[in-house]
Image (cartoon, rainbow, N blue to C red):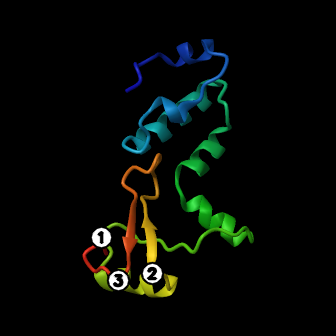
């Protein structure tokens, strides 16, 4: 975790790159709050706050697809989805293998390759 600093202490740095500083996949909400705090005090961020927020959550990929940028076939399931919802997504993707990953994640953490035919994988 980051050592607590007063808001004015963040101003002494020439540049702050916040995402590597926290294990943001486990502390997503805390990182969002921290980025807002840094913006509020006028700290110099490597990327603007809106870009950081946009890039932290993989939903940005869906936005890119809507703008015509090709991404791999992608489906999104919410936490607590039923097996019927999972089956519907799998059918719509029409694939034999897929990668399952969290919407907030990095470095392959909690990412799995699944063989659709193997029901225990699903």
Q: Which residue is mark 3?
A: 117
**Cα separation between marks 1 and 3:** 22 Å
Q: Residue at x 47, y 47 (%)?
A: 106
Residue lying at the far right of the rendered structure = 68
The picture places residue 17, in percent across and down from the top left corner, at: 59, 29
Image quarter (top left, top right, bottom left or bottom right) of the C terminus: bottom left
Vertical position of residue 113 compared to residue 12: above or below: below
Q: Which quadrant holds residue 116?
A: bottom left
Vertical position of residue 27 compared to residue 73: above or below: above
Disc 3 + disc 2, Cβ < 8 Å: yes
The picture places residue 111, in percent across and down from the top left corner, at: 40, 57
Q: Residue at x 56, y 15 (%)?
A: 8
Q: Which residue is mark 2?
A: 96
Eye-nearest disc, 2 or 1: 2
**Cα separation between marks 3 and 2:** 7 Å
**Cα separation between marks 2 and 1:** 23 Å
Classify residue 92 as left or right of residue 87.
right
Q: Please tell me whether mark 1 sits on a helix, a strand or a loop.
A: loop
Classify residue 80 as left or right of residue 61.
left
Q: Earlier in the sequence, mark 1 or mark 3?
A: 1
Q: Residues within 10 Å of mark 3 (few under 14, many from 20)?
A: few
Q: Please tell me whether mark 2 sits on a helix, a strand or a loop.
A: loop
Classify residue 29 as left or right of residue 65.
left
Image disc number at residue 80: 1
Q: Residue at x 41, y 72 (%)?
A: 77
């Amino acid at each position: 975790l980051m050592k607590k600093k007063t808001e004015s202490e963040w101003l002494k740095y020439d540049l702050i790159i916040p995402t590597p500083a926290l294990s943001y996949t486990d502390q997503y909400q805390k990182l969002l709050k921290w980025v807002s705090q840094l913006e509020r005090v006028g700290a110099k961020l490597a990327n603007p706050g809106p870009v950081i927020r946009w890039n932290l959550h993989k939903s940005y990929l869906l936005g890119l697809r809507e703008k015509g940028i090709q991404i791999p076939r992608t489906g999104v399931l919410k936490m607590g989805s039923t097996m019927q919802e999972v089956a519907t997504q799998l059918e719509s993707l029409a694939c034999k293998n897929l990668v399952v990953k969290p919407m907030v994640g990095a470095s392959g953490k909690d990412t799995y390759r699944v063989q659709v035919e193997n029901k225990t994988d699903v």
